[in-house]
Each structure stands twice: as C-alpha cells, then as structure tokens.
Image: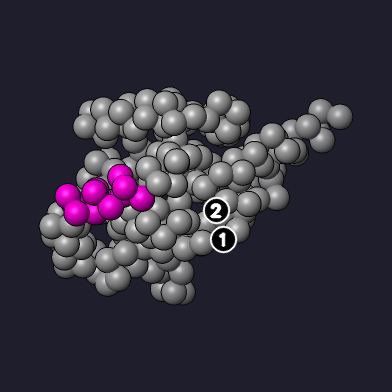
Amino acid sequence: MKRFFDIIVSFIALIVFMPFLVLLFILVWIKLGWPAFFTQERPGKNAVPFQMIKFRTMTNERDPNGNLLPDQLRITGLGRFIRKASLDELPEIFNVLKGDMSIVGPRPLLVKYLPYYSKRESMRHQVRPGITGLAQVNGRNNLSWDKRLEMDAQYIEKRSFWLDLKIIFITVGNVIMQRDVLAVSSETVPDFDDYRKEQSAKADHEN
C-alpha cells in the first residue's frame, strides 16, 4: 500500500509541478551553472546505494589548488532561497517513482556515515529513505544528531499509513512557513562522522 501511495502521489506531484520544475531548472542553469541537478550517492533500503537527485544550490568555485571552496562561500542568494523553500528537494520525486525513495521515511544521509550508526540507528535502513520524515517535522537540522536518529528509529517502530499522512500534512505547513530550515547546515551542524569521532575521543579521555 505504501509503494502504491508513493507512486500515485509522486506522479500527481510531477504533473502539477512540471512547469515549475522546468522553470527552476532553467533558472538554476543560468544563475548557478551546469549541471542544474546535483546528484550524490546515498544509502537506501538495506543500505544499498542509489543516486539521489536534487537541484544544485551552490556554484563550482574553487581555490587556486583546484579544491572546492567551503559551502558557505559557494552558496548564493538564489541557492539560499531554494533551500529555505525546500525547492531543491523537488527532483527527488523522480527517485520516488524509480523506487529508490519514498514520500515519507528517514532522510538518506551520506554513505560515509554508515560505519558510525549504532544498531538501533541502523534500523533506518529497513525502509526506503524519504523526502520527508518524522525528524524533519520535529526540528529538522535544529535537532542534535542523537535526537534526529532516534526520531528515525521511532518512525521505524511506529510506522503506519496514518503516521505518513500526518507527517505529510505537517511537512506542507513547515514548507509554507519555512520552519527549521538551515540554508547551510554545516554552519551549525557538524558532519555525523566527525560528531561520533569527537564523542569517542571524549569517552576515551574520560576513561
């Protein structure tokens, strides 16, 4: 039932938003450069990698050595607007149609984080990752890593069709009000692997 719901909702969303997707695609291409889409490998169901697609929100500016500049220096006013309005997530509709993602589920994080999850946190990979999820409607990037991943585990334990509907309705309200969105999360939120390494170092020091 969940997969059928995902296909129907994402197909309708694609039809409704197609003119806007085309317009945004052209705008991003002109203002931020080619390609207009940003793709990145993320772990899906059972931690099997897939290519997640989003609208790009940053330029490709590099330092004299050819390395990409920090996110804070590459994101533009347009990019910040796209992120705050959650418009960068719209192309993930294609991931849902393909079967890589679901409308609701734990957000797909980085592949490099896989070795750092606890057994309970790894439950997040029992289902397809989502465009939105329980953590996203309860604080999103304003949550600590521990709280965010606990929300994902709770979703796995409590998941139901009615919970998904509730999350979708709250998500719509949050997007309209632009709640709990950080244009550049790295400005305040450390990478999860760095966070866990720091925790481990503190524990070793205390022992």
Q: What residue is shown with label 2? A: 44
What secondary structure is the stretch in magenta mostly built from? helix
Gap in Å between the C-alphas at discs 1 and 2? 6 Å
Q: What residue is shown with label 1? A: 49
Q: Residue at x 24, y 54 (%)?
A: 14
Q: Amino acid at mark 1?
A: Pro
Q: Is residue 116 above or below residue 111?
A: above
Membership of 19 in magenta stretch: no
Q: Residue at x 49, y 29 (%)?
A: 160
Q: Position of residue 204 (x, y in %)?
A: 82, 35
Q: What's the magenta region? A: 7-17
Q: Position of residue 191 (x, y in %)?
A: 55, 45
Give the left or right position of residue 81, taking residue 113 as reference. Answer: left
Q: Position of residue 30 (x, y in %)?
A: 16, 67
Which quarter shows the N terminus? top left
Membership of 11 in magenta stretch: yes
SS label for mark 2: loop
- Is the C-beta separation of discs 1 and 2 under 8 Å? yes
Q: Residue at x 24, y 48 (%)?
A: 13
